[in-house]
């Protein structure tokens, strides 16, 4: 990457900068390879944050199916983490995982999990776990809230045999020939997934992030306190693909000790550590065993650290400096926090990030762990909260005696409750991924880059005023 114009003396964030187009030989945006270079096996440079309101097994599996990596949060009890990792590993790779609910559940129950605007079907189960029919998600929008799902089953949903589907293009064509949007996929009669025209199309563009056994990849986080060796070993045994050692102030002795312990186990997994924002932090954490640094102090949407402590660093400069330092050591950087538009992802990558971590934006999706709520105007949202908020501290340390809990609560540095609205046009994680990756593919071609390594090399970055940033926004109504 190179700057154009006079480099300001102060640090910069994403809104302060823009990408300058340059001569390109990349003929198509679909010719761009978005695979990350960080050794995690992800085929798009997108990671979901280890936040309880963001990454659970459903979101992690959906993200990995499209090539990204979900990081399960360290706050889950070890047993739940183990189950979540195994759950991701069991998910279909080539097909969608349909929502499964009891036939006795009501429409209102279903609408807390899947909105009527979603594509796809809800598969119903009887009391013995047998299939009891299907209900298209769209049907939920026209039924009474207390209607029993089992009473909404009319006719069948199309069903294909996996052996007859010669790849996603063939699945797309079969759906068109059958005149349907969605079908179940069976193998030897057993339900193995579902497919929509949209998901078949996506499968022709994205490549899943899979492990050596062809199962979806997943990462999990550990903190720096407690028996980190036992926890890291347990996660590795459950099949985790990447370990993330995470604490607010990553450049501290406690982190270095935890990293030495974990890297000394020789688990053979990439180790991510953070958060840091300086070259010195990078060097110390790499020396202690990290191969990827998680970068960002204070940019997160749920984060109050900058206002509480004045500590942090504008994120574009933090990524730029740490990525340069990491490159010299053969390490990599994940840009963590503050991403609100596809442009922010492109700029983080231009600054040298190998991947970009997204939290709150993904909390407002169908696949995020929370239940769907509707506000007074009927707009759908999910609740989100910071991992250093009073709410998160109470959940994490609730088992401590009241005195210890009260001591921990003194140091809240996050928002305890916020509403993240679902975008009615992009309610699912995959819709957001389409938006982000299409924006970033286009950024690459404007820079004449066909791969992430090319983009790191070729990106040209300029500086803009607040008026320059404002000019770039679309205008939904006339002025
Ligand atoms: N990226 C960011 O800007 C931030 C992210 N977070 C996220 O919140 C979650 C909770 O992290 P965390 O608060 O570190 O909790 P952890 O449970 O990971 O504990 C952090 C440990 O570090 C000690 N510590 C020393 N100095 C600090 C400091 N300035 N801030 C925090 N801990 C410190 C704490 O001791 P003691 O409690 O006695 O001080 C404690 O032992 C993580 O997921 C983290 O990534 C939190 C804040 C900022
Ligand atoms: N200072 C705090 N930072 C937090 C908290 N919870 C999460 N985070 C950080 O934010 C990113 C995600 O950023 P987003 O803008 O995409 O939401 C996450 O990975 C953490 O590093 C918090 O309570 N306080
Ligand atoms: K913030």
Image (cartoon, helix red, strand yellow):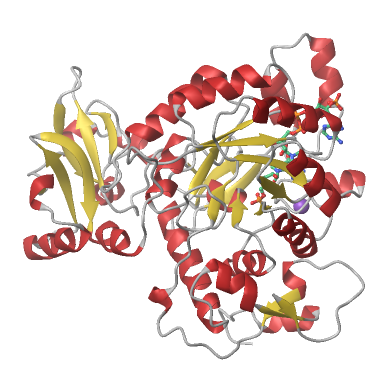
Q: Nearer the viewer, residue 456 or 427?
A: 456
Residue 424 in sight from this viewpoint? no
Residue 56 in sight from this viewpoint? yes
**Relative horizontal placement of residue 190, taking residue 376 as reference (left or right):** left
Residue at the far bottom in the pictured view? 23
Q: Nearer the viewer, residue 209 or 410?
A: 209
User: Residue shown at 47%/22% (left/top)?
Assistant: 237
Look at the picture and state if 372 lies above or below 475: above
Q: Nearer the viewer, residue 456 or 86?
A: 456
User: Residue shown at 59%/80% (left/top)?
Assistant: 474
Look at the picture and state if 456 lies above or below 209: below
Look at the picture and state if 231 lies above or below 376: above
What x and y, as percent, mark residue 122? 25, 40
What x and y, as percent, mark residue 417? 67, 39
Question: In what quadrant of the picture does the N terminus appear?
Answer: bottom right
What x and y, as percent, mark residue 358? 60, 52
* Image quadrant where residue 291 sits: top right
Question: In what quadrant of the picture does the C terminus appear?
Answer: bottom right
* Image quadrant where residue 206 sits: bottom left
User: Residue shown at 63%/61% (left/top)?
Assistant: 340
**Relative horizontal placement of residue 360, taking residue 286 as reference (left or right):** left
Count the numbered circles shown.
Answer: 0
**Relative horizontal placement of residue 376, taking residue 146 as reference (left or right):** right
User: Residue shown at 60%/20% (left/top)?
Assistant: 231
What x and y, as percent, mark residue 354? 60, 58
């Amino acid at each position: 990457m190179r700057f154009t114009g006079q480099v300001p003396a102060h640090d910069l964030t994403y809104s302060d900068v823009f990408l300058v187009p340059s001569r390109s030989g990349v003929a198509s945006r679909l010719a761009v390879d978005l695979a990350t270079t960080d050794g995690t096996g992800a085929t798009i440079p997108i990671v979901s944050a280890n936040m309880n309101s963001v990454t659970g097994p459903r979101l992690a599996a959906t993200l990995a199916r499209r090539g990204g990596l979900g990081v399960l949060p360290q706050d889950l009890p070890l047993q739940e983490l183990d189950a979540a990792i195994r759950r991701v590993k069991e998910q279909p790779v080539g097909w969608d995982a349909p929502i499964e609910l009891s036939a006795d559940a009501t429409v209102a129950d279903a609408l807390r999990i899947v909105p009527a605007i979603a594509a796809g079907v809800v598969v119903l189960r009887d009391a013995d776990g047998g299939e009891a029919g299907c209900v298209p998600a769209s049907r939920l929008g026209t039924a009474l809230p207390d209607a029993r799902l089992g009473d909404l089953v009319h006719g069948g949903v199309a069903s294909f045999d996996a052996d007859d589907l010669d790849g996603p293009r063939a699945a797309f064509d079969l759906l068109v020939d059958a005149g349907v949007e969605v079908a179940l996929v069976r193998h030897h009669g057993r339900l193995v997934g579902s497919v929509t025209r949209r998901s078949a199309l996506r499968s022709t563009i994205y490549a899943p992030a899979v492990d050596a056994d062809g199962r979806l990849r997943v990462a999990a986080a550990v903190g720096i306190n407690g028996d980190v060796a036992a926890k890291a070993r347990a996660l590795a045994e459950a099949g985790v693909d990447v370990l993330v050692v995470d604490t607010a102030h990553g450049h501290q002795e406690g982190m270095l000790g935890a990293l030495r312990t974990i890297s000394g186990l020789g688990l053979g997994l990439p180790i991510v550590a953070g958060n840091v924002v300086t070259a010195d932090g990078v060097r110390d954490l790499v020396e202690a065993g990290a191969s990827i640094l998680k970068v960002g102090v204070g940019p997160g949407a749920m984060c109050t650290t900058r206002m509480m402590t004045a500590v942090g660093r504008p994120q574009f400069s933090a990524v730029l400096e740490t990525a340069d330092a990491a490159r010299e050591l053969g390490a990599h950087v994940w840009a963590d926090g503050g991403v609100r538009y596809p442009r922010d992802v492109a700029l983080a990558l231009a600054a040298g990030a190998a991947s970009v971590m997204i939290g709150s934006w993904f909390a407002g999706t169908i696949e995020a762990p929370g239940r769907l709520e509707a506000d007074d105007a009927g707009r759908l949202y999910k609740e989100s909260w910071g991992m250093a908020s009073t709410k998160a501290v109470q959940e994490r340390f609730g088992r401590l005696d009241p005195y210890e809990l009260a001591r921990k609560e003194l140091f809240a540095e996050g928002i305890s409750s916020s509403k993240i609205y679902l975008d009615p046009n992009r309610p699912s994680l995959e819709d957001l991924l389409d938006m982000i990756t299409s924006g970033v593919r286009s950024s690459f071609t404007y820079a004449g880059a066909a791969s992430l390594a090319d983009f790191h090399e070729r990106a040209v970055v300029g500086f803009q005023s607040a008026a320059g940033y404002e000019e770039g926004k679309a205008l939904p109504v006339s002025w």
